[in-house]
Amino acid sequence: MYRLENNIITTDHDPLDEKYVGGLGCYCFNFMKKNGDKIAQINVATDEQETYNTLLLKSIRTGIALRKMGIKKGDLVTFFSKRNLNSCVPMIASFLIGAIPSYIDTTFPLFDIVHFMKTINPKLFLVTPDFLETIKSLIGEEQQNTSTVAFTEDFFTPVEEEAKFMPIFVDDLQETAIIHFSSGSTGYPKGIYINHYSLVCNKAFSFENLWIENQPKVVLTFDSLHWSIESLRLLCSIKEGVCRLIVPDEDDMKKAWFFLDKYKVNLAYLIPWTLVNMFENGKPNNMDFRDLTTIYIEGSLLPAKYHQGLQKILPNVDIFHWYGQSEAGGLTTFRKNDLHREYNRTKPGCVGTPILGFGMSLKVVDLESGEAVGPNKPGELRVKSRALMNGYHNLDSSDQFDDDGWIKTGDMVYYDEDFCFFIVDRIKDLILFQGLHIVPALVEAELLTHPAVKFAVVVGVPDDKDTEHALGLVALYDNFSSVTSGEIEKYVEERVPDKYRLRGGVKMIKESYLKSTNKIKRFKLKQLVLFGEI
């Protein structure tokens, strides 16, 4: 199962199954045809649904339309959309013709969208009509050669070529399949090159033993395809013939109990903020959750009191953490067996054991010496596998790897004698608020526009309900010593979207703490805050 040698954990590599040959285009085409009349997705706002046959036909027609626009293998296509039944169509269509898709959720603040756009220079922007003029107004010099087209029902018009359409065959699964954006954990978001192998062969969501026999398979998630995790879930759903619930409105996260009951959900992927609200509101007495087998907690750790409390409310449901990164793929998870259920209940905070089947190696290294350490010793997790990213779009990614080719996750972890992993903290500076990602660099940029602020760093401080709140650490110019933290906090609040507010407040600290701040120093600053030393 696992091998431990010189403090390096290695998992077995399963032979490549023939059904994965040819890359994501062949994968989607073949499995969608196989699952034909099964329900592929339901829009919970309208109860509109469609089958895999319908979804495949729309994707084929869109792929043909893209080819007629001059899109060919290796071209970049970026799609702007809210979550709806058509959100995944340009992505699947791109896979079918060998183009490289990326996705930007138009429910994000313009503040974020502008920065996502700056990281990529595609051949084509596909935009839902309601957002077309906005995107055109945001296009900068770097996108002057990018075409911008409204994505309408016209893309689904029948064409003669669809009868003989075949997906492009990818010989090398290490080729880039998609670009997903990083969450801004070490500065501004980056475009991540993710290869075919990472998505078709990753066993993070094998969906094994998650369903009730002879009943429809239904999965609930509130994520958009902006995030790599949702693309992986889409592909696993296509393979297994699973029905995905599409939730267009973020506010509907508060209706999780209702959705679980109404649609007889078997499997749900929920963030801690949603689960905390579910626990605090209590399980409705008039609802039936006998179809629910598993809840995976994603995004961050759910505090133990809520995890244990929900487990008591739902004793027959496995409520598991899991762990992964866009740059490194899925890394650890629990499996549906008695041993892992015992681990989940007796090892609070455990995020599972290494995922089996695709030849992954993991090591935990001491932050100072860089040496691999053994069980129960914290350090940075580093990973090697064929599922690692191919790099960043238009950016050097060499600093994300160590000298021996191991990717540096930026997360402090440890593992025990059972190979169960625990997240200690993030060396990286990403802040998680109610399941949303706060990019510290963006808030720091606003802080530095205040005339009194000389240096600024934003870190996350724990909050049981919201996961983390953003806290601003600032050093003032000498001639502005009378400026208060409240004034600076209000200044930022007036200039940023709600999620970026400094809910953790503002602390005035000595300039010496903030000069030449880098990743490790930022991590140390957070520790000083948490231990009350600044």
Image (spheres, helix red, strand yellow):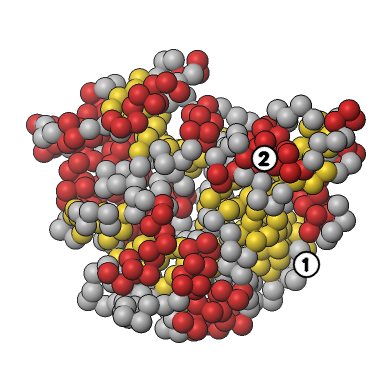
Q: Picture coordinates of residue 425 (x, y %)?
A: 70, 59
Q: Residue 413: which quarter of the image? A: bottom right
Q: Residue at x 40, y 46 (%)?
A: 225
N-term-proximal mark, 2 vs 1: 1
Q: Is residue 106 above or below residue 217?
A: above
Q: Which residue is drawn at 84% across and 59% down?
A: 532
Disc 1 target residue: 377
Of residues 311 and 402, the one drawn nearer to the viewer in this rendering:
311
Position of residue 204 in the picture relative to residue 496 (left or right): left
Q: Is residue 429 above or below residue 530?
A: above
Label 2 vs label 1, nearer the camera: 2
Amino acid type shown at disc 1? Lys
Question: The N terminus appears in which quarter of the rendering?
Answer: bottom right
Position of residue 57 in the picture relative to residue 498 (left or right): left
Position of residue 223 in the picture relative to residue 85 (left or right): right
Q: Picture coordinates of residue 410 (x, y %)?
A: 68, 50
Q: Is residue 331 visible?
A: no
Q: Mark 1: which secondary structure?
A: loop
Q: Is residue 27 visible?
A: yes
Q: Picture coordinates of residue 379 (x, y %)?
A: 75, 59
Q: Which residue is drawn at 30% across and 66% down?
A: 218
Q: Distance between the residues labelled 2 and 1?
A: 42 Å
Of residues 84 and 380, the one drawn nearer to the viewer in this rendering:
84
Q: Residue at x 37, y 35 (%)?
A: 80
Q: Residue 288: which quarter of the image? A: bottom left
Q: Mark 2: which secondary structure?
A: helix
Q: Which mark is residue 512?
A: none
- Count of marks, rendered view: 2
Q: In this view, does 384 lie above or below 162?
A: below
Q: Picture coordinates of residue 301 (x, y %)?
A: 59, 64
Q: In this view, does 156 lie above or below 21?
A: above
Disc 2 target residue: 490
